[in-house]
């Protein structure tokens, strides 16, 4: 009987997490939906519009050497240009996807932080799902986060967040912390 109760509890948590992810996604979509048809800005002209290096997906050396310290950004620019040329809508979709991914990672990171043994004696731990959801919603909709979604060359800060979140998540996973 206890095994069946445990399965129901896990199923309830999964449903809750899917529901929270849906709310985060919809909130992000509402917050950034007006940006999908915005034009290129600032450094976007040098790095995308006027950058001949990204125009040929097969010329790896050209786009790699154009910005050797930002290979992931350049790779996304190359792929965006290869499939959509200068249709800014798709550049915004990619940035939005990266931003939403970061919001999901923020949710998991906060959830795991509140699952750490050091907080197990505090009453606030009962509300860790809600706290993680609020933090992720603030992250996805806060006005200071708009630059990484509106200005394409600013997505490098998003990549840093992804890497940091993944490293933190891996550390928690390796320590076998359950949420």
Image (cartoon, rainbow, N blue to C red):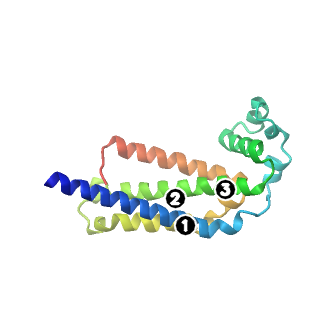
Residue assigned mark 1: 26
**Which callout, 2 or 1, points at the residue further toward the start of the chain?**
1
**Mark 1 crowd level (few <14, some 14–19, many ≥20, 10 Å Cα):** some
Q: Is residue 143 visible?
A: no
Q: Tell me which numbered mark, 3 or 1, is placed earlier along the sequence.
A: 1
Whether 145 is drawn above or below 82: the answer is below
Q: CA distance from mark 2 to mark 3?
A: 15 Å
x 38%, y 58%: residue: 111
Residue 110 x %, y %: 41, 58
Q: Nearer the viewer, mark 2 or mark 1?
A: 1
Query: Is 56 located above or below residue 90 in the figure?
Result: above
Q: Please state if 167 lies on the left or on the right of 91 as rendered.
A: left
Q: Quadrant of the C terminus?
A: bottom left
Mark 2 — residue? 103
Residue 158 drawn at (x, y percent): 60, 52
Towards the viewer: 160 or 118: 160
At x 67%, y 56%, the residue is: 93
Question: Which residue does the image show at 39% across and 43% down from the upper left?
Answer: 171
Callout 3–callout 1 Cβ contact below 8 Å: no
Q: Which mark is residue 158?
A: none
Badge 3 local density, few (<14 within 10 Å), some, or many (20+)?
some
Looking at marks 2 and 3 on the same chain, the residue that comes earlier in the sequence is marked by 3
Residue farthest left in this picture: 1
* In the rendered image, the vertical position of residue 124 relative to residue 52, given as above or below: below
Mark 3 to mark 1: distance in Å? 14 Å
SS at badge 2:
helix
Residue 1 x/y as whole percent:
13, 55
Question: What residue does disc 3 label?
Answer: 93
Residue at image point 45% right, 68% down? 134
**Real-space CA distance between mark 2 and mark 1, rounded to the nearest whole angstrom:** 12 Å
Marks 2/3 in contact by CB < 8 Å: the verdict is: no
**Residue 87 visible in this rendered orientation of the protein:** yes
């Amino acid at each position: 009987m206890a095994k069946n109760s445990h399965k129901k509890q896990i199923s309830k948590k999964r449903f809750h997490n899917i529901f929270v992810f849906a709310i985060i996604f919809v909130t992000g979509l509402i917050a950034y939906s007006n940006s999908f048809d915005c034009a290129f800005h600032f450094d976007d002209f040098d790095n995308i519009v006027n950058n001949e290096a990204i125009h040929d997906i097969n010329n790896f050396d050209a786009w790699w050497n154009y910005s050797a310290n930002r290979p992931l950004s350049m790779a996304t620019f190359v792929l965006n240009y290869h499939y959509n040329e200068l249709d800014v809508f798709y550049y915004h979709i990619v940035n939005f996807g990266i931003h939403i991914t970061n919001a999901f990672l923020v949710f998991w990171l906060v959830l795991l932080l509140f699952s750490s043994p050091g907080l197990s004696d505090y009453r606030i731990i009962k509300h860790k799902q809600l706290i993680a959801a609020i933090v992720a919603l603030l992250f996805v909709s806060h006005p200071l986060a708009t630059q990484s979604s509106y200005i394409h060359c600013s997505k490098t800060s998003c990549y840093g967040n992804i890497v940091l979140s993944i490293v933190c998540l891996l550390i928690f996973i390796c320590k076998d912390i359950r949420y």
